């Protein structure tokens, strides 16, 4: 548009620069810090593992292209100063097209369209955008020559803010998937301690994520010390990946079974417990790795008699925390089993746990009452995990 005022012409040049700068900053930060692992998975899947994704270079290239697209729309569309940010919405839509795909792990990491409600929501926004463009051409900004910079800048920032919010909401935000991808990347670099910090306090989990955490804990020799610090759902089948699990940038199945020095048979596919029992019986080297996996599997299956049998020759004080918790609980359940070296403080804690669990409360369930103090114990998993 042509403006007679020098101040207005300056404003008309400043606002597109501010919008472009804000979009470029948002795009780079969003891609690099929040979606780089997802984009790496998409490129790995689409290229069948032939190429890899560099987060820094990829984020810079995508941001550069989308910024050029926005600048092109800025020149193509004759918009009032108060609506110049509308030219950057197509770039936001293209950004969303990069990160809005849904990954279905249960279907071999198939790349799928977003859920239908989200697609309808985006279609409504697209129609609203076209209507807004039309209104901008019908009702020109007659006060544009007189309005100060702030009055022009505010609606543009509001439009951009809403656009960034839509991108953030409509992009792939599956928490377990992002945790999986982040842990896989760290495991591929043997950064086991950092991998164990990912989502440590979160309730969201998945079988693959649990298998990776068990592997990282085993590599750190803390499987019996920290396993129940994480959200666990299901039985011991979540400890090991499928032998034919979908290949990603990090081959989890190969790493885990190489670590165990045993691999399940491709034909019979035994259960996790049976596989670990058979491997343990054939283990002539008395591998502590395999033993810890079997002991932890017994805990996840709540098979305390077998667990106590495996630890019959061990000193209680030398055992990891979760193992001592399980044996202390088993001594309470089975009066025929006696701890050789009772842990007095742990027995007191277990007594408090059982006493509080049996108390009647119309406001809070036992699980809620005990979560804050005992959520990281095996006892909490034994009684409340599903």
Image: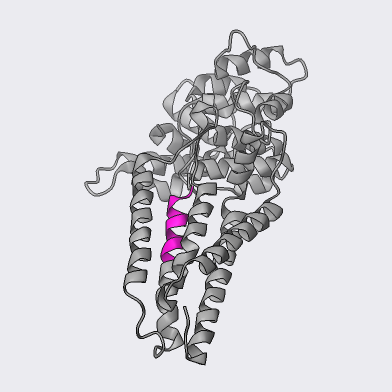
Q: Nearer the viewer, residue 385 or 140?
A: 140
Q: Residue furthest top?
A: 268
Number of on-image labels: 0
The stretch of residues the image draws in magenta is: 161-171
Q: Can residue 69 be seen at all in this image of the molecule?
A: yes
Can you give x and y, in whole percent of width and height, for residue 344 in the image? Answer: 52, 41
Q: Residue furthest left?
A: 362
Q: Residue at x 45, y 29 (%)?
A: 234
Q: Nearer the viewer, residue 178 or 87?
A: 87
Image position of 301 (left or right of 364): right
Look at the picture and state if 72 lies above or below 52.
Answer: below
Q: Can residue 320 be seen at all in this image of the molecule?
A: no
Can you give x and y, in whole percent of width and height, for residue 309 in the image? Answer: 58, 19
Look at the picture and state if 154 lies above or below 317.
Answer: below
Image position of 8 (left or right of 225): left
Q: Nearer the viewer, residue 309 or 332?
A: 309
């Amino acid at each position: 548009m042509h403006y007679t005022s020098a101040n207005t012409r300056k404003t008309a040049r400043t606002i597109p620069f501010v919008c472009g700068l804000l979009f470029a900053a948002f795009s780079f930060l969003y891609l690099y810090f929040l979606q780089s692992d997802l984009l790496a998975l998409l490129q790995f899947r689409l290229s069948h593992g032939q190429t890899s994704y560099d987060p820094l270079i990829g984020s810079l290239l995508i941001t550069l292209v989308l910024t050029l697209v926005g600048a092109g729309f800025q020149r193509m569309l004759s918009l009032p100063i108060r609506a110049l940010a509308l030219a950057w919405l197509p770039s936001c839509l293209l950004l969303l097209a990069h990160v809005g795909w849904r990954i279905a792990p249960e279907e071999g990491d198939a790349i799928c369209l977003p859920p239908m409600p989200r697609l309808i929501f985006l279609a409504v926004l697209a129609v609203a955008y076209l209507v807004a463009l039309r209104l901008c051409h019908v009702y020109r900004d007659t006060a544009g020559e007189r309005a100060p910079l702030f009055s022009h800048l505010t609606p543009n920032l509001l439009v951009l803010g809403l656009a960034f919010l839509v991108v953030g909401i409509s992009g792939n935000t599956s928490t377990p998937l992002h945790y999986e991808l982040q842990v896989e990347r760290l495991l591929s670099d043997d950064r086991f301690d950092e991998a164990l910090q990912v989502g440590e306090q979160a309730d969201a989990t998945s079988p693959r994520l649990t298998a990776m955490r068990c592997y990282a804990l085993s590599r750190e020799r803390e499987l019996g010390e920290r396993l129940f610090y994480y959200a666990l759902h299901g039985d011991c089948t979540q400890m090991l990946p499928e032998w034919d699990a979908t290949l990603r940038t990090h081959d989890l199945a190969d790493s885990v079974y190489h670590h165990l020095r045993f691999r399940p048979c491709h034909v019979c596919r035994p259960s996790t417990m049976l596989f670990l029992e058979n491997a343990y019986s054939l283990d002539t080297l008395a591998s502590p790795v395999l033993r810890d996996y079997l002991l932890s599997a017994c805990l996840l299956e709540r098979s305390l008699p077998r667990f106590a049998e495996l630890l019959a020759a061990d000193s209680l004080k030398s055992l990891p925390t979760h193992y001592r918790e399980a044996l202390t609980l088993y001594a309470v359940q089975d009066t025929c089993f006696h701890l050789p070296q009772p842990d007095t403080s742990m027995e007191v804690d277990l007594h408090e746990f059982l006493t509080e669990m049996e108390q009647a409360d119309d406001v809070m369930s036992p699980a809620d009452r005990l979560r804050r103090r005992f959520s990281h114990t095996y006892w909490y998993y034994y009684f409340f995990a599903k």
